[in-house]
Amino acid sequence: MDKAQVIASVAGDLTATEQSVDEAIARATALVQSMIGSRSALNLSPVVGAESQAKALEAIAALGAARQAVVACHQELAKDHRRLGYGVYAEIADKYPEGERPKVVGEHRLRAV
């Protein structure tokens, strides 16, 4: 593999990780919403399921911390990328038709995805 392929591989894994954490947060919040809605639909006391809801909310907080860590990882990788002088490696042609490409500012900046 050449440099561009290695960098693209890491960038792809980073993007997949970011998306996975975001999806996990969305699913966990949907779980809490479902728990609350189910309790209301069954006309149960707010006391019922309080502990399980608290655990789900703890999980959401932990996922939020994980998301912050992944974002920090992304920022550090971007710094390393610039320090090593690799410039921009993006397979823009595959994602966007001609004339609809995103504007890339500066030659050593990663674009937001």
Image (cartoon, helix red, strand yellow):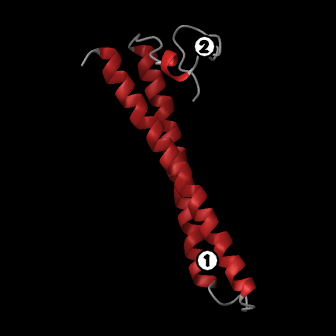
* SS for dot 2: loop
Q: Mark 1 or mark 2: which comes first in sequence?
A: 1
* SS for dot 1: helix
Q: Is residue 110 left or right of residue 100?
A: left
Picture coordinates of residue 80, whole percent (x, y)? 41, 22
3D distance between C-alphas at marks 1 and 2: 44 Å
Picture coordinates of residue 71, whole percent (x, y)? 53, 39
Picture coordinates of residue 104, whole percent (x, y)? 60, 13
For the N terminus, the image quarter is top left
Which residue type carries mark 2?
A: Val
Q: Which mark is residue 104?
A: 2
Q: What's the residue at 47%, 36% (across, down)?
A: 15
- Mark 1 — residue? 53
Q: Quadrant of residue 33?
A: bottom right
Residue extending farthest left: 1
Q: Is residue 44 left or right of residue 110?
A: right
The vertical placement of 2 against 56, above or below, is: above
Q: What's the residue at 65%, 90% (across, down)?
A: 48
Q: Please tell me whether mark 1 or mark 2 is closer to you in this view.
A: 2
Residue neighbourhood size for the residue with mark 2, other residues' Cα within 10 Å, grouped as few (<14), some (14–19), many (≥20)? few
Pointer 1 with pointer 2, Cβ within 8 A: no
For the C terminus, the image quarter is top right
Residue neighbourhood size for the residue with mark 1, other residues' Cα within 10 Å, grouped as few (<14), some (14–19), many (≥20)? some
Q: What's the residue at 55%, 74% (across, down)?
A: 55
Picture coordinates of residue 64, whole percent (x, y)? 57, 54
The vertical placement of 64 against 3, above or below, is: below
Q: Is residue 37 left or right of residue 24?
A: right
Q: What's the residue at 75%, 84% (across, down)?
A: 40
